[in-house]
Amino acid sequence: MIDKAHRRVIFASSLGTVFEWYDFYLYGSLAAIISRQFFAGVNETTAFIFALLAFAAGFAVRPFGALIFGRLGDLIGRKHTFLITIVIMGVSTALVGMLPSYASIGVAAPVILVGLRLLQGLALGGEYGGAATYVAEHAPPNKRGLYTSWIQTTATLGLFLSLLVILACRSILGAEFEVWGWRIPFLISILLLAVSVYIRMQLNESPVFLEMKAAGRTSKAPLTDSFARWPNLKIVILALFGGTAGQAVVWYCGQFYALFFLTQMLKVEAFTANMLIAGALIIGTPFFIVFGALSDKIGRKRIVLAGCLIAALTYFPLFKALTLYANPAIEAAQTQSPVVVVADASACKFQFDPVGRTVFSASCDIAKGQLARAGIPYANEDAPGAVAYVRVGSQVVNAFEGGALTAAEFATQSAAFGAQLTTALNTAGYPASADPNEINYPMVLLILTILVIYVTMVYGPIAAWLVELFPARIRYTSMSLPYHIGNGWFGGFLPTVSFALVAYTGDIYYGLWYPIGIALMTVVIGTFFLRETNGAADVE
């Protein structure tokens, strides 16, 4: 049982991570609108890529925030540091809602947006380590898993809060939401900030930090002690590759990539997909507490690594089952009329154009580009020297070489090729969207719930494990870096990397090799090189 004083500590510490997930789902859910508002100077596809890259920028700088604020936390205390981080995070989120669009201030709009995302990322880099450290240092040693697991449940609250606000604004404002109403969810973060700051101001400093300070045992150089001394640096590296990297990819695959897969690959309507994910989170969220408490009994390490291993072994059958139950027409069409791009493999390019200035004029690129944009799975067949064509079952649609064409001629032929390809795909039974009447909702919900339970296995005990791996005097700094490199880089870039793999190969499941590979790496390294911390004495 958690007493009243400790409940207040957990609640106040968790508010910052609510911000993290609220902003995460808010920006992700509104990425299409944000791309039109702030990246209107390029074509629609490139604008969406830029919006995703701005999203990713926040993840990229999180480790640097961990260094900056982790050092402060070990120097001046946990409470004051994560009071600073939540103010930066809240103000940055609110300012996104106030930012003029590209139409109003031109290129300054996306530049400022990316700047705000960087500030959010820096603040987040210090937020989680502070919350986890603060809660763990208030918890009895035999209940650290239980206490810190409450922080992990805030992902669900952040999701529901963002969905609730977005849905309420859409229903009230209608078409105006796309014009200006999308700003309201960002502005509401001011209220979250005010409540969070007020509650955190009432808290006392961590008793462990106060004891160290009174005894003169705090670190004078947390960065040097954490990363310039090999015994501790070795644990930092092992905690990253043997702990947080696998935890991160399982987390992002089980929620964010699962949502992406439903909407982009299986063409399930966005509202339906979000509701299914939300339902899985409602069912699965109590397991954060279950596995956190269980880690106090059987250990943190074995639960986290078991979650990584089980996820890696079952992702392929689970995502294939998701296709079967969410949009069986795709599987049926693919079985009856497989799509094959027949082209000179040496002429095909990797179609990533971050500046929107490259014209992919080779016939292979034209054919693959059309299919990738349509979300159609395809196989590749090498035909050296040939002009590419797409085989849809027994139908053949010829692409064209566009290198010698004028822009107008290229646009005309591209439109004609696209129309012919769409007709062939429709004739072969490839659906433009998932039929709501054909979705097996209970089975889809069950699969998504299993994916969420994997998330709770790896994420529920991770905070307690990281806290206990490092000595208290440099704990904030040391644990924050591997957590945020793992979650900010390995996890945060999972959707981008996985989508690139899918687009390159034409296999809608190929992107799963990224989380599977990282998770298996973590299992091996964690098993042989990281210690179990539950029940062991704290490191001095």
Image (cartoon, rainbow, N blue to C red):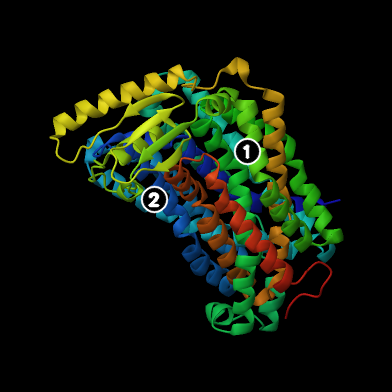
Crowdedness near tag 2: few (<14), some (14–19) or many (≥20) residues, C-alpha within 10 Å: many
Q: Which of the 4 image quadrants contains residue 522?
A: bottom right
**Which of pointers 2 and 1 indicates the residue nearer the eye?**
1
Picture residue at 20% right of the left edge, 37% below the top: 402
Which residue bears the numbered disc 2?
116
Instruction: Please tell me whether mark 2 sits on a helix, a strand or a loop.
Output: helix
User: Which quarter of the rendering shows the C terminus?
Assistant: bottom right
Q: Name the amino acid, label 2.
A: Leu
Amino acid on which the number 1 mark rests in the picture:
Phe
The relative height of residue 22 versus residue 125 in the rendered view (above or below) is above
Percent coordinates x, y for residue 53 in the rendering: 39, 48
Q: Nearer the viewer, residue 318 or 537?
A: 318
Spot occupied by residue 125 in the image (x, y as percentages of width and height): 52, 60
Instruction: Name the residue furthest top.
Output: 437
CA gap between label 2 and label 1 equals: 35 Å
Instruction: Name which residue lies at 52% across and 44% down.
Output: 24
| Residue at image coords 43%, 23% | 425
Are the residues tagged 2 and 1 within 8 Å (C-beta)? no
Residue 473's disc is none
Q: Is residue 233 left or right of residue 454?
A: left
| Mark 1 nearby-residue class (10 Å; few <14, some 14–19, many ≥20) | many
Residue sitting nearer the eye, 76 or 457: 457
Residue 86 falls left or right of residue 467: left
Q: Quadrant of residue 438?
A: top right
Can the viewer see residue 194 in this picture?
no
In this view, 366 is above or below 218: above
Q: Earlier in the sequence, mark 2 or mark 1?
A: 2
Circle 1 residue: 319
Judging from the image, what secondary structure is the residue with disc 1 in?
A: helix
Q: Could you say where residue 419 lies in the image, as x and y percent from the top left?
A: 32, 21
